Image (cartoon, rainbow, N blue to C red):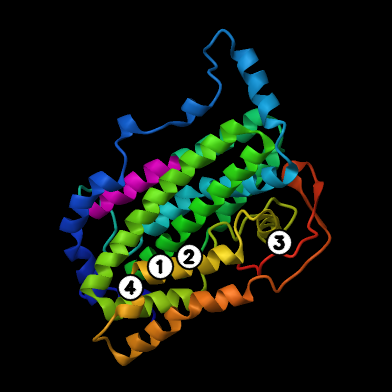
């Protein structure tokens, strides 16, 4: 029986999630930023109502012209990932105990889901408009990739289990934060300060969302440590499926793998990051200190406590050479001569 079958309205996991509503209600104000205090995409883009709008766009494009092709590829990949938000919100709303029953429910979990979605929605909007105004990429190819990714969907292998779901999001929010932050560093090195600031703002949102999902799991570990640690081990054994795995520009079926190679080469997101995130979560949830748990939970605990170190040892073993071309940048080629860390897909 899968977790999807076993997580019902009478299951212990469901009861734990429901019991956390009061806790979540108290936490939401510190986890979501009030709308009237939030940044918006237009804060970072040329003001088209200004009399100097032509000069503003010209300056914008001149500044973006310094970005190398490698930076453009990882930026597009990150933007495409953000633009698949409808898939992620639908998935979050399927987790048992989290569901927004009416679409406007006042329950804490429903309010969190809608608030998280509204904050995340700005990320794709801003990066998409940045790339469009930059004139540096083939927007039809990029838009086709977004269309295909939404059409193809994604399976994070969480089986609608809220424990697996919050472990996944704790991991993925940190991974996304790292990726956006590092794209910003690439932009800074190239002299593109505007994009550096944009990526920093987005990474800041991801850091706050990471904090939220780690907090949810911390509470679950307090309330149900045995099932929580077993879920953590299960999620790590199945490996974290990256949200954009099924991206497709209509030409290249292995597009995500190619994008991952560039992310590895540029240091935007690597296997060392994957290993580091595992270690961070193991420490955050104090896995080594769990006591009084079942034999199955103890085995999961033992597995998790050495997992980050094992991934760190694997890092750097795969080498590759050659070039890859991307329709996003008009089929220009990117050299991949490097000694990257082991690719996690």
Q: Could you classify mark 1 by the number of other residues whose Cα lies within 10 Å: few (under 14), some (14-19), or many (20 or more)?
A: many
Dot placed on the residue nearer the N-terminal end, 2 or 3: 3
Q: Residue at x 70, y 60 (%)?
A: 261
Give whichever of discs 4 and 3 has the lower sequence position.
3
In the displayed structure, would residue 52 be above or below residue 172? above
Pick whichever of labels 4 and 1 is earlier in the sequence.
Answer: 1
Choose mark 2 or mark 3, whichever is in front: 2
Spatial CA span between label 2 and label 1: 6 Å
- Outermost residue on the right side: it is 322
The residue that mark 4 highlights is: 286
Q: Is residue 13 above or below residue 130?
A: below
Residue placed under numbered mark 1 in the picture = 281
Position of 133 relative to 107 (above/below): above
Question: CA separation, marks 4 and 1?
Answer: 8 Å
Residue of label 3: 254
Quarter holding residue 51: top right
Q: Is residue 110 visible?
A: yes
**Mark 2 sits on what residue?**
277
124 sits to left or right of 133: left
Query: Where does residue 185 sit, x and y in percent of width and height?
Result: 60, 44
């Amino acid at each position: 029986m899968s977790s999807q079958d076993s997580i019902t309205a009478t299951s212990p996991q469901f009861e734990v999630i429901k019991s956390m509503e009061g806790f979540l209600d108290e936490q939401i104000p510190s986890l979501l930023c009030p709308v009237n205090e939030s940044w918006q995409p237009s804060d970072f883009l040329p003001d088209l109502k200004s009399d100097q709008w032509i000069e503003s766009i010209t300056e914008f494009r001149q500044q973006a012209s310094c970005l190398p092709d490698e930076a453009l590829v990882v930026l597009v990949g990150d933007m495409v990932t953000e633009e698949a938000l409808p898939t992620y919100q639908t998935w979050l709303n399927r987790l048992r105990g989290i569901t927004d029953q009416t679409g406007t429910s006042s329950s804490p979990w429903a309010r969190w889901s809608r608030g998280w979605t509204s904050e995340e929605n700005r990320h794709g909007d801003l990066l998409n408009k940045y790339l469009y105004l930059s004139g540096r990429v083939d927007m039809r190819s990029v838009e086709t990739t977004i269309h295909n990714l939404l059409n193809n969907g994604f399976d994070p292998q969480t089986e609608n289990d809220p424990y697996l779901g919050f472990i996944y999001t704790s991991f993925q929010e940190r991974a996304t934060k790292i990726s956006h932050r590092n794209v910003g560093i690439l932009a800074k090195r190239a002299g593109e300060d505007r994009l550096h600031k944009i990526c920093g703002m987005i990474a800041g949102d991801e850091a706050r969302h990471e904090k939220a999902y780690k907090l949810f799991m911390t509470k679950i570990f307090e309330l149900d440590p045995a099932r929580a640690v077993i879920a953590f081990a299960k999620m790590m054994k199945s490996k974290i499926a990256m949200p954009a795995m099924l991206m497709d520009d209509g030409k290249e079926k292995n597009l995500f793998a190619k994008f991952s190679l560039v992310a590895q080469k540029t240091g935007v997101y690597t296997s060392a990051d994957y290993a580091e995130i595992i270690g961070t979560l193991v420490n955050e949830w104090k896995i080594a200190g769990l006591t009084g748990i079942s034999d199955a939970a103890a085995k999961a605990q033992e597995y998790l406590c050495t997992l980050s170190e094992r991934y760190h040892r694997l890092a750097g073993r795969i080498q590759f050479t050659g070039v890859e071309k991307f329709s996003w940048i008009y089929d220009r080629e990117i050299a991949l001569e490097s000694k990257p860390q082991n690719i996690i897909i």
